[in-house]
Image: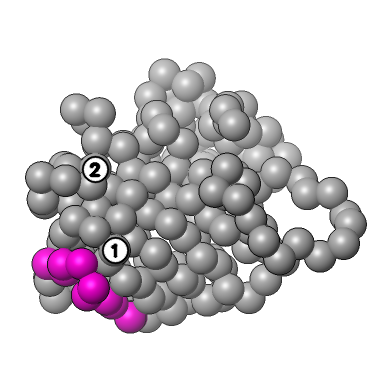
């Protein structure tokens, strides 16, 4: 599934009656950055995109969600049916791309579950993330450095985390292999 981030962001901004300058001020970015994102000439980090969406406010989940058909409840999802919340063109240089794959439509539930993959050198961006929720996860493979407020810890396979997501936080793969995490966030605000 290919998503035109620039067009979607521009549509959202225009629907809210905001200029690029107003959105940039709310997000703490330059209006030039907003312009480049809308023209698909630059790919924001996960944290930068989150800052822009928080200015509306809209979660990453809502931004990337597709309209699902109304029908019988869906309980099972094939790996190909997860929603990618971090398109493949978002990531930190050298091809290190974070993948945040969401199980189901978080807007229809009180729990958001993600299958996260951080290649070596990848991280969520230079800015710390913060959102109204609690989150927890377990590292399945690889290692990840997680910063929460003023604490920094390197987690190995089998290790986990649980924290108030309002605290500033960041994820960074400092290892030499992909780090895979399964995480949950409630309520779904990421």
Foreground: 52 or 76? 76
Instruction: State which mark lies toward you, 2 or 1.
Output: 1
* Residue at the spot of label 1: 140
113 lies above or below 39: below
Q: Residue at x 62, y 39 (%)?
A: 13
100 lies above or below 151: above
Q: Secondary structure at mark 2?
A: loop
Q: Is residue 127 visible?
A: no
* Residue at the spot of label 2: 119
Q: Residue at x 72, y 40 (%)?
A: 15
Please tell me in which quadrant of the rendered image residue 163 appears: bottom left
Q: Residue at x 57, y 43 (%)?
A: 80
Where does the image place residue 27, in percent across and percent down from the top left? 43, 48
Q: How far apart in space, not on screen, are marks 2 and 1 (Cα)?
A: 13 Å
Majority secondary structure in the magenta region: strand
Q: Is residue 93 visible?
A: yes
Q: Which residues are magenta?
A: 154-163
């Amino acid at each position: 599934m290919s998503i035109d981030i620039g067009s979607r962001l521009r549509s959202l901004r225009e629907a809210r009656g905001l200029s690029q300058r107003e959105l940039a001020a709310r997000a703490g970015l330059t209006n030039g950055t907003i312009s480049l994102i809308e023209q698909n000439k630059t790919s924001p980090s996960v944290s930068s995109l989150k800052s822009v969406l928080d200015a509306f406010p809209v979660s990453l989940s809502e931004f990337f969600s597709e309209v699902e058909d109304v029908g019988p409840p869906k309980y099972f999802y094939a790996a190909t049916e997860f929603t990618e919340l971090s398109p493949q063109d978002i990531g930190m240089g050298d091809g290190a791309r974070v993948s945040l794959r969401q199980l189901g439509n978080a807007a229809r539930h009180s729990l958001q579950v993600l299958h996260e993959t951080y290649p070596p050198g990848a991280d969520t961006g230079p800015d710390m993330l913060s959102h109204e929720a609690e989150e927890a996860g377990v590292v399945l493979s690889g290692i990840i450095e997680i910063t929460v407020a003023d604490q920094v810890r390197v987690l190995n396979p089998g290790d986990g985390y649980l924290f108030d997501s309002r605290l500033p936080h960041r994820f960074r793969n400092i290892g030499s292999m992909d780090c895979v995490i399964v995480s949950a966030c409630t309520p779904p605000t990421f």
